[in-house]
Amino acid sequence: MANSDTQPQNWNAFVEQWNEQFLEALEGNMEAQAEFVESWSETVEKTTEENEISDGVEGYARAYEAWMNASQQMVDRMNDTLEGEDVELEEFRDIWLNTSNEAFKEIMSTTAFAKMTGETVGDVLEAQQQADEAAETTLRTLGFATESDVVEVGDRLVELERRQHAVEEKLDRVLEALDAREDEY
């Protein structure tokens, strides 16, 4: 009967510890997300350096020009249709698809876009690492094997196999030496 009384207490302690670890991991994740948003905001503010602004504005201007050219092409082809020329619908679609590709290329080729993208990717990777560390801490606290635990066990197994192989080779040499001695007698 005493055993059944301690089980709920052990269970309650386990659940309480699990809840605490979950809340800590959640808090860590929220902090990482907040840091990411803050870093991203700082990155956007940093891109206001004059040459980056100039490059960015030029890229957007080239993209805008591409859209204006596409609009003119659409008007021209619509006029051709009104004049009786047979214009395929796919041609209209192709004008917009090609223009979209060209406009995105113009914007994405700017140094401001590249800098923002690079810093954002770095921030995402850092947030991912923090989330992984929080998850590993939670799993370890709950008594589950983590990825690093499995990797460590794998490394140890490889080392044991290497040592076993070395011992087997030495044993083979000793047995060969003993067999050679027996043959002499």
Image: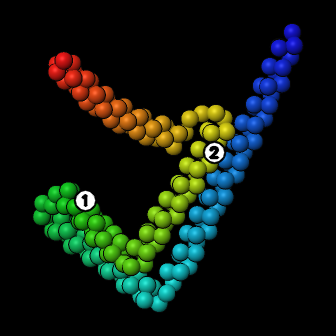
Report helix, strand or loop for mark 1.
helix
Report helix, strand or loop for mark 2.
helix
Q: Foreground mark, 1 or 2?
A: 2
Looking at this view, name the residue that lies furthest to the bottom.
50
Residue tagged 1 = 93
Residue at 71% across, 42% down? 21
- Give the quarter of the image for residue 175: top left
- Report x, y in % for residue 41: 58, 72
Seen from the viewer's position, the closer of residues 39 and 77 is: 39
Q: Is residue 156 depicted above or below 176 in this figure?
A: below
Indicate left or right for 141 with 156 as reference. Answer: right
Indicate left or right for 52 with 179 as reference. Answer: right
Seen from the viewer's position, the closer of residues 30 and 74 is: 30
Residue tagged 2 = 137
Identify which amino acid the numbered label 1 is placed on: Arg
Residue at 49% across, 80% down? 47
Q: Is residue 43 depicted above or below 26 in this figure?
A: below
- Report x, y in % for residue 58: 36, 84
| Disc nearer the start of the sequence (1/2) | 1
Q: Which color scheme is applied?
A: rainbow
Seen from the viewer's position, the closer of residues 38 and 84 is: 38
- Give the quarter of the image for residue 159: top left
Query: Alpha carbon of mark 1 to alpha carbon of mark 2: how far?
Result: 52 Å
Identify which amino acid the numbered label 2 is placed on: Thr
**10 Å crowding of disc 1: few (<14), some (14-19), many (20+):** few
- Report x, y in % for residue 128: 53, 54
